[in-house]
Structure formats: structure tokens, C-alpha cells
């Protein structure tokens, strides 16, 4: 199989890097050129695939949104709300003090 990778030169990489305001090291320029050429080669190979008759899809899996009615239900009680809280003082959640504590002050 012939290599269909478009030739990306070191100058191409320098030009793209300049446009992106990047300053790659000189020793990284040639490996980037090879990698970009490989990426463009894969894109060229994908373009060879006959996709006529294939419906466009957004996902590989057949997914659909699950929707339900937005209906008013019974509200939770305070006990239900606080049931899984690590600490509480009904009807409030208790949380550790974040600001102003002596042991937590940063100086």
C-alpha cells in the first residue's frame, strides 16, 4: 500500500506554530511534522471509505433522551432532606466553619 500521507514539512510546522503563538523547541519540529503527516494520512484514508447510504449519526450507540412529565409532587419532609446529611441541627445542615476559625486562619 502506498503511503498517502501528505507531506508536512518542518517549515509547515514552524508556520502553524507561529500562527498558534507557540514556540516549540527546534528538536521537536521534525517529530511534529511526522506526527501531523500521519494524522493527515489517517484523514485521507477515512475519506476513501464509501459512506453513501450511511445515515449520519451523533453517537455510535442508539441513544434517545428520556423525558418525563414535569409534574408537581409531594415535597420532602425536613427529616427526609436531612436523612443522609453527615451532620445536622434540624431544620439546618451543619457544615464545618470555613472562615474566621482560629485553627483554620491562614495568618
Image (tube, rainbow, N blue to C red):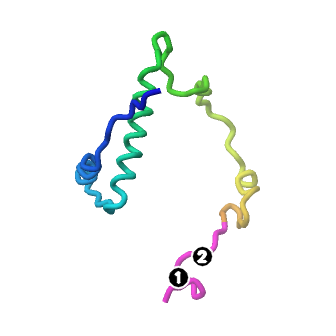
Residue interval drawn in magenta = 94-107
- 23 or 56: nearer the eye? 23
Q: Residues within 10 Å of mark 2 (few under 14, many from 20)?
A: few
Residue 48 lies, in percent from the top left, at 43, 21
- 39 or 75: nearer the eye? 39
Q: Main secondary structure of the magenta part?
A: loop
Q: Is residue 39 above or below residue 24?
A: above
Residue 98 located within the stretch drawn in magenta: yes
Residue 17 lies, in percent from the top left, at 28, 53
Q: Is residue 105 above or below residue 60?
A: below
Residue found at x 72% / y 67%: 87
SS class, disc 2: loop
Residue found at x 23% / y 54%: 18
Q: Is residue 93 above or below residue 69?
A: below
Residue 90 located within the stretch drawn in magenta: no
Disc 1 designates what residue? 100
| Figure quadrant of residue 73 | top right
Q: Is residue 62 visible?
A: yes
Determine contact: label 1, label 2, CB under 8 Å. Answer: yes
> What is the distance, in whole Å, between disc 1 and disc 2 at their CAs?
8 Å
Disc 2 designates what residue? 97
Residue 26 lies, in percent from the top left, at 31, 61
SS class, disc 1: loop
Horizontal side, residue 94 vs residue 10: left or right: right
- 93 or 107: nearer the eye? 107
Q: Is residue 67 visible?
A: no
Residue found at x 75% / y 54%: 79
Amino acid at each position: 500500500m502506498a503511503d498517502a500521507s501528505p507531506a508536512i514539512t518542518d517549515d509547515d510546522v514552524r508556520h502553524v506554530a507561529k500562527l498558534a503563538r507557540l514556540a516549540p523547541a527546534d528538536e521537536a519540529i521534525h517529530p511534529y511534522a511526522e506526527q501531523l503527516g500521519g494524522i493527515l494520512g489517517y484523514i485521507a484514508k477515512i475519506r476513501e471509505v464509501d459512506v453513501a447510504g450511511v445515515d449520519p449519526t451523533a453517537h455510535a450507540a442508539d441513544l434517545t433522551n428520556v423525558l418525563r412529565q414535569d409534574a408537581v409532587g409531594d415535597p420532602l419532609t425536613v427529616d427526609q432532606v436531612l436523612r443522609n446529611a453527615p451532620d445536622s441541627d434540624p431544620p439546618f445542615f451543619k457544615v464545618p466553619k470555613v472562615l474566621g476559625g482560629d485553627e483554620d486562619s491562614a495568618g
